[in-house]
Structure formats: C-alpha cells, structure tokens
C-alpha cells in the first residue's frame, strides 16, 4: 500500500557557532609638517568602521579601521590645543572551526580602549583594544510530515511547539550626509573631534519592504583661527528600504546598523561649513512566530509502518522588550568648576545581568569623560568620573535559564553647570533585551509501509498490569490498540491515574 503523506516546511536559521574575542591594533602616527609638535595628549577617541566582512572555511575575516581623533597640547609659545585625525587600519582573521563560506555572518565590534603614547614631538604610538562578538549561522529548509491522508486507523502522538521560522534576511546601504554650517564669525582651522550616534530608530513594514528610519546624531568640536574652541551639534536623517519577500507587520524584525565608512572634512565650496558623510549598512532578519503541531511518534494497528525521524535545532520564543533607565545626579567636580562643557563621552558598561521569573536585573557603571574649557592657558581639559547604576526590567515569560542578549543605547545626555558649580547630570539609557532559546526538536520526514496486514492478537481483550515508565501511548502502541479505547474501557480520565501495578483491560482495535 502506497502511503499518501502531506508535508509542510520550515525555514530555520541555525546558529552554527558563536565566539567572543578581543584583539589589539597598534601603529605609529606621524604628525604632518603643517602641524606643531606634540607636547602631550589631552584626549583621544575613535569610531570603528567596518569595510568588509567575509567567511572563509574555518575562519572569519574582518577588514576595517578606527577613525581616531587625538587632541594634544602643542609645543608652542601659545601652548595651543591642536588635533590629529588618523585612520588605524586593521585586518583580523579569527578561527571559527565550523564556519563555511556559504553561511551568514553577524558581528558586533566595539572599541574598548584607545591609548596614545608620545614617542617624540613628531610621532605618537596608538594602541586600540577591540571587543568582537561573532555569530555564524546557516539557513536550512526542513520538510516534515504533518499527516497521512489515505490510512484511517493511523495513531499520532503530537506535540505543540512555538517556533521562529525565518521569513528572510536582507540588507541595504544608506548614506547620512550633510553640510554643517558653523558660526559665520568662526574661521575654521581644523575639526578636533567628531562623535556619532544612531538614535531614534524606527521600523515599518509594508508591501514586501522594511522601511528603516533613524537619525545620525553628530557632535563636532572644532578650532578657530583665533584659538577658540566651539561645538557644533546636528541630526542627519537616515532613511532606507530593505526588500524582503512575504514580510508583513506580524513578523519580528531584527535590525542592525553598522558604520562602514566616514568622511569629515571642511567644505571647500562653501565657507564656514564642514561636510559629513557616513556610509551605513543596515541589515534585517525577519521571523514568523509559528505554533505548530508536530508528529513525534505514530503507528497503525492494522499495518506495519516505518518512519525516519530527525533532530533539528530551532529558535523558540524570540521576543524583545525595551525600557529606559533614568540616571539623575548632581556632582561637584572641582576640576570643572564653572567652566564650559564642550562634550561628554558616555560609556555604559553592564557588569552583571541576573534573570528571575519575569524579571531582569542589571548592575553596572556609566563612565563619563568630560571635555571642558580649561582654567589653564591651553584652553581645554578633561575629567573622567564613574556613576554606578542598578536597573530592573519586566520581561514576562523569561526564566533564569533563558538566553538574553542586551543592547544598551544612550537616549539622552544633558550636562549643565549650575550656579553652585555642581554639574546637573541627566542620562537616559535604553535597554533592549532580546530573548530566544535554541532547542532541539524531533520531526518525522519519511514514512513507509513494511507490509499491508499486521498480525493481530486472537484475543479481543488483554489484561495488563502497568510498569514503571508506562503511559497510555506506549501501552496502546505495544498492543495495537488506541489510547481512546483503553481510556474508555478502564474509565481513565488522566495519565496521572496510571500508577505502577494498575490493572488495565486492553481492547483490540476494531474499525
């Protein structure tokens, strides 16, 4: 007898390997002839740009640079503050044993530290430490049997699963670019520092497209010909589309931004302005939450059946929650006094993440690096302080063993010098927690008959005494009966009634 089976399919994004690593990039930087000698470094910062990522067999290669700004005290009679802007290029190859070149690569690279050492008046040594998180995954289409249409007496043991099926993934390149106009009284000498943050992220889905909208927040410190230091702030809109077939509003979209290249330069065509262009790659993975009834075991009382079963890894219960941690402090910082604050570098660090049922507790620090007008004749100075934080987020459904990835972004940062020379600090941290467990489930992908008629017991009823590990399914399958008929004959309403040694009457199956 040829069986007629109905099949369905799932597209699974399976994590093949994950790795966290730290690597160092270092090089010497020569001061251009047009700039004065370096006496000492005041402040340094960097923006990571990723030119290219690729998977090789057993390896991952990352090409990029750190766009760094070094503010320094010039060795001159005026003790001016000047700056250097240089790219610290790197190529990093990381061993990922299971990686294949047809897989997907997801990375997150952060600049942990950037140190500058003055070697002599014309040369400094840069050393950067970067943290990298790597995830290698593959797409696999899985077919499974969901029913047999031409065999009436087949018995199924089903189990319900909530599974995240991959709808699709895609990416696009967008450009955030603008000409920033500075005060007409300012004759620009050089850009001393640039900070970038991607904020106000929004996503909308329609017509097989994912619309992404956000803002590139720019903070630029610059030097004028009359040796003044000023700050320019601006928001540059980011808009783009990612084409994804069959994507809809019900799907969960995981959006990631990555800066690939950056240009910051005085605008030669227009006075008192600076041109900024950031090339940004935006990627999207869309998932559909499916509730599926999967066959875990089957048999027929009348026909011998053989089936093949496969274990597959699936993602389950992918969800995200966001909440804002408000940090409000008043600090007396003696070094700042009543000075003007040009900028503050804000670095949140999660030191501990604790999960309980329906709740996540975070503990960590926010590192603040103040850049302000100095009381000395060099015109600028810096001061670092650390603020601790403790924050709780409600996340219904999570348990202590749930896998959680947390992303922290800075929503707001305001620092005001008060009349009493204290600094009023307002920092809002947006915590986004993403849950998702990888589980192994069994699917049945092929079924065939061994013979048309199964040998049946000559008796219409069998008496059986239950043993350890028994359940109605196992007993029914063993005696070619059905769970329903055994329960009916013995008045069983719940599996809990199957105590060891219980006497059961097992009726033979009849159509």
Image (cartoon, rainbow, N blue to C red):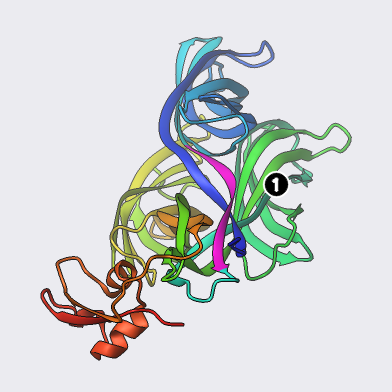
Locate residue 340, reporting x and y percent.
51, 48
**Which sits in the foreground, 316 or 408?**
316
Check the image and report above or below for 470 versus 210.
Answer: below
Locate residue 19, reporting x and y percent.
42, 35
Check the image and report above or below for 205 versus 383.
Answer: below
Image quadrant in which you'd find residue 74? top right
**Which sits in the foreground, 195 or 440?**
440
Check the image and report above or below for 98 versus 118.
Answer: below
Image quadrant in which you'd find residue 150? bottom right
Q: In the rendered image, is residue 392 in sight?
A: yes
Which residue, as the protein is rendered here, is positioned at the far right?
A: 269
Report the magenta residues as a range: 134-147
> Where is mark 1, residue-wise?
171
Check the image and report above or below for 113 versus 478.
Answer: above
**Residue at left offset 31%, top offset 74%:** 458
**Residue at left offset 59%, top offset 36%:** 103
User: 144 left or right of 506?
Assistant: right
**Which sits in the foreground, 25 or 171?**
171
**Which sits in the foreground, 2 or 52?**
2
**Residue at left offset 48%, top offset 75%:** 153
Locate residue 87, reporting x and y percent.
62, 23
């Amino acid at each position: 007898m040829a069986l007629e089976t109905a099949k369905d399919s799932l597209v699974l994004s399976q994590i093949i390997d994950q790795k966290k690593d730290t690597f160092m990039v270092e090089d010497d930087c020569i001061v251009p002839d047009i700039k004065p000698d370096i006496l000492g470094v005041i402040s340094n910062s960097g923006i990571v740009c990723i030119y290219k990522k690729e998977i090789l067999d057993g390896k991952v290669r990352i090409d990029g640079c750190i766009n760094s700004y070094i503010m320094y005290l010039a060795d001159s009679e005026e003790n001016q503050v000047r700056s250097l802007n240089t790219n610290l290029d790197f190529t990093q190859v990381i061993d990922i044993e299971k990686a294949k070149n047809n897989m997907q690569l997801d990375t997150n690279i952060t600049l942990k530290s950037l140190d500058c050492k003055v070697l002599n008046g014309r040369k400094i040594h840069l050393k950067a430490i970067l943290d990298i998180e790597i995830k290698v995954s593959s797409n696999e289409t899985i077919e499974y049997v969901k029913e047999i249409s031409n065999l009436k007496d087949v018995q199924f043991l089903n189990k319900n699963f909530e599974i995240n099926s991959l709808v699709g993934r895609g990416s696009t390149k967008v450009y955030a670019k603008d000409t920033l106009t500075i005060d007409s009284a300012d004759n620009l000498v050089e850009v001393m520092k640039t900070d970038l943050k991607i904020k106000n992220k929004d996503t909308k889905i329609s017509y097989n497209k994912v619309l992404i909208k956000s803002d590139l927040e720019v903070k630029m410190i610059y030097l004028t010909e009359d040796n003044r230091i000023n700050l320019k702030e601006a928001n540059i809109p980011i808009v783009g589309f990612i084409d994804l077939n069959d994507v809809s509003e019900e799907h969960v979209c995981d959006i990631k931004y990555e800066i690939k290249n950056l240009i910051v330069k005085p605008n030669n065509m227009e006075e008192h302005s600076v041109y900024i262009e950031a090339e940004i790659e935006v990627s999207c993975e869309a998932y559909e939450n499916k509730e599926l009834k999967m066959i875990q075991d089957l048999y027929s009382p009348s026909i011998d059946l053989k089936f093949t079963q496969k274990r597959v890894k699936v993602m389950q219960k992918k969800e995200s929650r966001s909440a804002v941690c408000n940090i409000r402090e008043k600090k007396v910082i003696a070094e700042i006094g009543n000075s003007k604050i040009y900028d503050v570098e804000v670095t949140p660090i999660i030191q501990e993440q604790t999960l309980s049922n329906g709740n996540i507790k975070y503990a960590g620090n926010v590192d603040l690096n103040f850049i302000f007008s100095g009381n000395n004749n060099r015109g600028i100075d810096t001061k670092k302080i650390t603020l601790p934080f403790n924050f709780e987020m409600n996340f219904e459904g999570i348990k202590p063993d749930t896998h959680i990835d947390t992303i922290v972004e800075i929503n707001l940062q305001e620092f005001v010098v008060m009349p009493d020379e204290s600094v009023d600090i307002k920092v809002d941290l947006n915590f986004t927690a993403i849950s998702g467990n990888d589980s192994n489930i069994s699917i049945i992908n092929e079924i065939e008959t061994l013979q048309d008629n199964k040998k049946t017991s000559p008796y219409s009823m069998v008496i059986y005494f239950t043993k350890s590990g028994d359940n109605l399914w196992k007993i029914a399958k063993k005696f070619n009966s059905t769970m329903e008929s055994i329960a009916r004959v013995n008045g069983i309403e719940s599996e809990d009634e199957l105590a060891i040694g219980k006497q059961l009457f097992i009726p033979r199956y009849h159509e």
